[in-house]
Amino acid sequence: MKTGFIGLGHMGSAMAANLVKAGHDVTVFNRSREKLRALLELGAHEAGTVADACHGEVVVTMLADDTAVADVALAKDGIVETLAKGAIHLSMSTISVGAALRRGASLRPSGRGGGSQAVHRRLGRGCCGRNVQAALRRVGTEDRSHQQ
């Protein structure tokens, strides 16, 4: 699966690395470029901008807070403007319900983002990437008929 990944801190870099190792075509973006090196050596592709990471079937974000998500999702040339119709924004960030609803509402009219769903789960150690892979497998198979 062609996947963009934005946010390469401790959790994000581990998740993106596991996706690359699992054979996904992963394009990575991070504000601080030194975090890219190890992933590029694994076979990930470098995105020069947020928009460059949004050309696949899904873009995953693992960001620090509401402001960071808004900065990449809602800004000019951000996820909302550049994500292809039918593509998914899978936000793995710890953000408020309000921020998640705003992001979902901004994607819905354009047919992008796959709807907005809140997922609450405590993750155990060593799970980075496996949960993202499971979510990517389910993304296309969920019944979303209840969403508007």
Image (cartoon, rainbow, N blue to C red):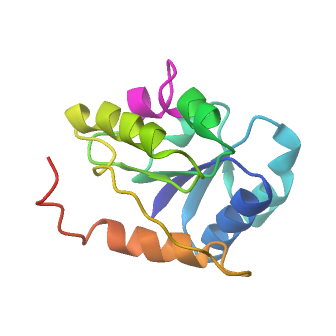
Residue pushed farthest left?
A: 145
Q: Foreground residue, 97 or 112?
A: 97
Left or right, 53 with respect to 107, comes to right
Against 145, residue 68 (above or below) is above
Residue extent of the magenta highlight: 73-83
Q: Foreground residue, 84 or 126?
A: 126
Q: In the rendered structure, does residue 131 fall within the stretch colored magenta? A: no
Which quarter of the figure has residue 44?
Answer: bottom right
Q: Residue at x 33, y 31 (%)?
A: 106
Left or right, 107 with respect to 52, comes to left
Residue pushed farthest right?
A: 34
Against 98, residue 136 (above or below) is below
Q: Foreground residue, 35 or 26?
A: 35
Instruction: Decide if residue 50 is in sight here.
Output: no
Q: In the rendered structure, does residue 79 fall within the stretch colored magenta? A: yes
Q: Position of residue 45 (x, y in %)?
A: 66, 50
Q: Position of residue 133 (x, y in %)?
A: 51, 74
Q: Residue at x 47, y 38 (%)?
A: 99
Left or right, 140 with respect to 143, comes to right
Q: Position of residue 78 (x, y in %)?
A: 50, 28
Q: Position of residue 142 (x, y in %)?
A: 24, 70
Q: Residue at x 24, y 33 (%)?
A: 110
